[in-house]
Amino acid sequence: MENKYRKDTDLELLHYADNEMLAVLVEYLTVDQDGEPRISEELTANEVFKRAGKNYQKVWQLIAAELQHYGGNTLINLVRRKGVSYQEILIDVCKKAGLKTDFDAETVDIEQALLAFMFDKTWGEMTEEQRADIRKQLKMDPSLTGAAAISALLAGVRLGGSSSYQVAMIIANSVAKALTGHGFKLVANAGVSRGLGLAAGPFGVALSGVLALHAVSGPAFRVTMPCVIQIAAIRQQILNQSAEKPFF
C-alpha cells in the first residue's frame, strides 16, 4: 500500500533541496544500520520513485510521505496508517533526546535548539585539546575560551545565521558518516567545507557515542532522529542560499 503524503508546509523545502542531501535522507528511510533494505519501507517499490532515478527533487512528496509514516509508527497506532506532521516528529525526537525547549516555537527555532543541544552534548564528550582544535577549525573568537566559547557558539546556533548553517552541516555530515559510512561530497560554502572535516575526527567519534546512547529509544526513532537532523541541515542550507541570493 502506497504511503500518502500529508500536506505539510514544513516539508515543502524538500522540493528545493540539493539531490545529494535528499539522497542521504532516502538512505536513512530505506536502508538499515546493516546496509540491508528496511522491511517496512515502501519508497523503493514505488514505480514513480523508481522512474525518477536519482532526481529526488521530482519525488520529494513521496520521500516526505515515507518520513510521515515512520513518524506515525512512533507516535500513533499502526492500524491507522496515517502519517503525522513533521513538527510532531521533530518534537518527539527532541523529547526522546532529552531536549527541553519551547515546543510552541516555529519549526526552524526548534530545529536550531536541537542542533545546539546535539553540539553541546558532543562537546561534553571531548577533551580540552580536541575542543581547542574545533575552536580553531570553526574560527571561533580566540578571546573566548572554556564555557564562554561554547556558550557563544550555541547562542549563535539558536539565533540562526551562519553559525546555524555551519553547525547544522557539520552535525548532519557527522551523522551521515556514522550511520551510512560516507558524508557529503558537495558543499557550496568553502567555510563549511573546512568544518566538515570534523566529521572524520574526534567530533565525529564523540557524536557517534551520543547517537548510540539514543539508539535504545527504538527502531522508528533510529530513523526519525537522523532524518530530522538531515532536514534541519537542508533547511539551514536553503536559508543560507536565500541570504546570499533570493531563493524563491
Image (spheres, rainbow, N blue to C red):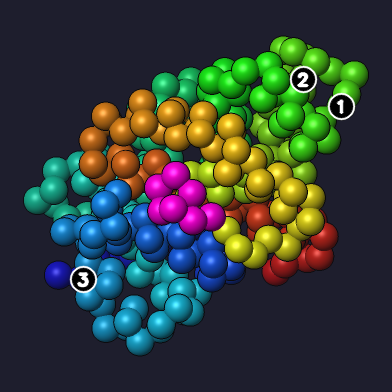
Q: Which of 210 and 8 is in front in this view?
A: 210
Residue type of the residue flagged with mark 3? Glu
- Secondary structure under tag 3 reads loop
Return the x and y of residue 118 as percentages of the image width and height. 53, 30
Would residue 178 be counted in the magenta stretch? yes
Over which residues does the magenta segment extend?
177-183
Q: Tell me: residue 33, above or below residue 244.
A: above
Q: Which of marks 3 and 2 precedes in the sequence?
A: 3
What's the residue at 67%, 31% (across, down)?
A: 158
Of discs 1 and 3, which sits in the foreground? 1
- At mark 2, the secondary structure is helix
On screen, residue 73 above or below 136:
below
Quarter containing the N terminus:
bottom left
Q: How crowded is mark 1: few (under 14 residues within 10 Å), some or many (20 or more)?
A: few
Left or right: 131, with 121 as reference point: right
Q: Residue extending furthest left?
A: 79
| Crowdedness near tag 2: few (<14), some (14–19) or many (≥20) residues, C-alpha within 10 Å | some
Q: x%, y% of residue 170?
A: 62, 44
Label ID, residue 56: none
Mark 1 is on which residue type?
Asp
Q: Are marks 1 and 2 in contact (CB under 8 Å)?
A: yes
Question: Which quarter of the image is occupied by the C terminus?
Answer: bottom right
Q: What kind of element bears circle 1?
A: loop
- Whether tag 2 and tag 3 are in contact, CB under 8 A, the answer is no
Residue 35 falls in which quadrant of the image? bottom left
Taking depth in this image into account, of 148 and 1 the one nearest to the observer is: 148
| Residue that label 1 marks | 141
Q: Residue at x 44, y 53 (%)?
A: 181
**Residue under numbered circle 2:** 149
Residue 210, located in which quarter of the rendered image? top left
Residue that badge 3 annotates: 2
